[in-house]
Image (cartoon, rainbow, N blue to C red):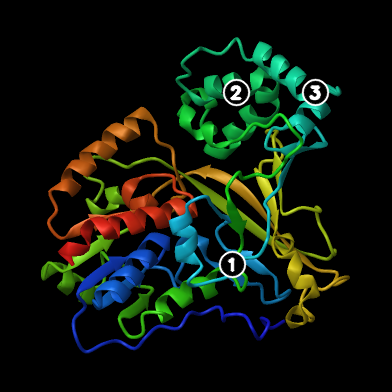
């Protein structure tokens, strides 16, 4: 099945190579690298060489249209755009429009499905009750009293937020699967991102703006590059550490924005920073609708996967779009794409997704950052370069801030 005609092809085009040397080398074509490249090219008029070891732009946010069904699938797990940052929202809307998609998640625990994040509906369903908001607050306050006043790990933080019964049901075992690390050994900051509501609002995010790029992530990212004319040259399938032409630029001391792993840049001199990685198991199912929602989490130790994504639910508006008439978005197509997500401990050669960020990791990171501060022409950025968990909008905001900070150097 072909991708709809009005959607981007799966292989991004690149401007022709220039005969002149670039002014700036950017390593990594994810959101941080793309944003820096666009700003440097469009606002400063500099020539940028943007490289990536993968065969596509967009980093982990990349999506592609499944050949059999025509469904847009997020290649590296679900990525949902949401922000309350007006500067970021105005910036991204230069390159794409967004749908009205609102992300909602459900979770299966002992064969029963609950709404997530924890809200009044979750609480009443779990306790088989009809608590009012105030009654639910009182209940959770009582159940959270076993937690220390100043939580030092994820388990203590989770119990302080939702009490021990809800934590044990929905967070404890899910966390053990997701991070391959007991909750007692993880930072309390991880769970602070999860909202708890005492009403029946089960939107996953609280942000002012939310949606998905109308024509897909690749179209958005390609528009960023195209807006720069011939100022950006993209080379894909290029390894920064092994490519001889890139080595020449490194020897010349070219200004470089590096968005790869900071420990890899220094050849793991002090050891490896720990990451969580994932395996994604994709399948085409011969049903119209596999699970009735975009994402279903699994709270218990079995099954081994943490969640299942069903990507056609991310773009329900496409069911009525004639451009998608011959795809599985159409009603009664009898096809859908799902992806089971399994967490695993990262080993060298795996894709790093989420920093584990223990106290030992933070101490190790400081050593690498000391080296980075001594660099004259190397700028580290993005989640890999900074060993940081960034949502998409925070990545863009960080890139915009870094550009403003350093533009005089360019």
Residues at marks 2 and 3 touching, judged by CB atoms closer than 8 Å: no
Residue 211 lies left or right of residue 364; in this view the side is: right
**Does label 2 or label 3 sit earlier along the sequence?**
3
Q: Which numbered disc, 1 or 3, marks the residue closer to the eye? A: 3
- Residue 338 position, x and y percent, is 71, 59
User: Distance of mark 1 from mark 3, alpha carbons?
Assistant: 38 Å
Q: Identify which residue is drawn at 66% across, 86% down.
A: 5
In the rendered image, the vertical position of residue 399 relative to residue 145, given as above or below: below
Residue at (34% x, 88% y) in the render: 16
2 or 3: mark nearer the eye: 3
Residues packed near mark 1 inside 10 Å, few (<14), some (14 to 19) or many (20 plus): many
Image x and y of residue 380, in percent: 27, 54
In the image, taking residue 29 as reference, residue 336 lies left or right, namely right
Q: Secondary structure at mark 1?
A: loop
x and y percentages locating residue 344 in the rendered image: 53, 43
> Residue 8's spot in the image, x, y percent?
57, 80
Q: Is residue 303 above or below residue 333?
A: above
Residue 28's image quarter?
bottom left
The local crowd at label 3, few if under 14, some if 14 to 19, many if 20 or more residues have their Cα within 10 Å, is few
Q: Which mark is residue 132?
A: 3
Q: Secondary structure at mark 2?
A: helix
* Residue at the spot 63% in from the left edge and 30% down from the top edge: 171
> What residue is shown at x 65% (from left), y 44% (from top)?
204
- Spatial separation of the CA atoms under disc 2 and disc 3: 18 Å
**Residue designated by label 1:** 213
Q: Dot 2, how many residues are within 10 Å of its Cα: few (below 14), some (14-19), or many (20+)?
A: many
Q: Is residue 39 left or right of residue 98?
A: left
Residue 161 badge: 2
Nearest to N terminus: mark 1 or mark 3:
3
Screen quadrant of the C terminus: bottom left
Q: Secondary structure at mark 3?
A: loop
- Quadrant, the N terminus: bottom right
């Amino acid at each position: 099945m072909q991708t709809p005609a009005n959607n981007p092809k799966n292989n991004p085009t690149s401007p022709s190579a220039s005969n002149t040397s670039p002014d700036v080398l950017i390593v990594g074509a994810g959101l941080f690298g793309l944003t820096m490249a666009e700003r440097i090219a469009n606002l400063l008029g500099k020539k940028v060489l943007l490289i990536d070891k993968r065969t596509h732009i967009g980093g982990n946010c990349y999506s592609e249209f499944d050949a059999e069904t025509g469904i847009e699938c997020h290649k590296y797990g679900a990525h949902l755009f949401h922000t309350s940052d007006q500067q970021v929202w105005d910036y991204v809307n230069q390159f794409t429009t967004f749908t009205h998609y609102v992300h909602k998640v459900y979770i299966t625990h002992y064969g029963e499905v609950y709404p997530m994040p924890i809200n009044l509906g979750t609480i009443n369903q779990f306790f088989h009750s009809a608590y009012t908001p105030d009654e639910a607050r009182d209940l959770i306050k009582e159940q959270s009293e076993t937690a220390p006043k100043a939580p030092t790990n994820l388990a203590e933080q989770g119990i302080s937020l939702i009490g021990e019964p809800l934590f044990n049901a929905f967070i404890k075992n899910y966390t053990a699967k997701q991070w391959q690390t007991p909750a007692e050994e993880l930072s309390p900051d991880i769970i602070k991102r999860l909202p708890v509501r005492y009403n029946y609002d089960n939107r996953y995010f609280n942000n002012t703006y939310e949606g998905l790029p109308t024509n897909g992530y690749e179209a958005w990212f390609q528009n960023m590059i195209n807006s720069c004319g011939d100022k950006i040259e993209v080379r894909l399938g290029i390894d920064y550490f092994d490519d001889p032409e890139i080595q020449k630029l490194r020897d010349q001391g070219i200004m470089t924005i590096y968005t790869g792993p900071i420990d890899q840049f220094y050849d793991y001199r002090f050891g490896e920073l720990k990451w969580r990685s994932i395996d994604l198991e994709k399948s085409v199912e011969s049903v119209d609708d596999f699970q009735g929602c975009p994402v279903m989490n699994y709270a218990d130790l079995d099954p081994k996967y943490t969640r299942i994504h069903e990507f056609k639910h991310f773009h329900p508006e496409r069911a009525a779009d004639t451009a998608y008439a011959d795809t599985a978005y159409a009603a009664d197509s009898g096809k859908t794409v799902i992806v089971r997500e399994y967490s695993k401990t990262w080993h060298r050669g795996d894709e790093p997704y989420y920093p584990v960020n223990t106290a030992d990791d933070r101490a190790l990171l400081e050593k690498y950052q000391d080296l980075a501060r001594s660099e004259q022409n190397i700028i580290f950025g993005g989640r890999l370069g900074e060993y940081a968990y960034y949502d998409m909008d925070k990545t863009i905001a960080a890139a915009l801030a870094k550009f403003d900070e350093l533009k005089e150097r360019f």
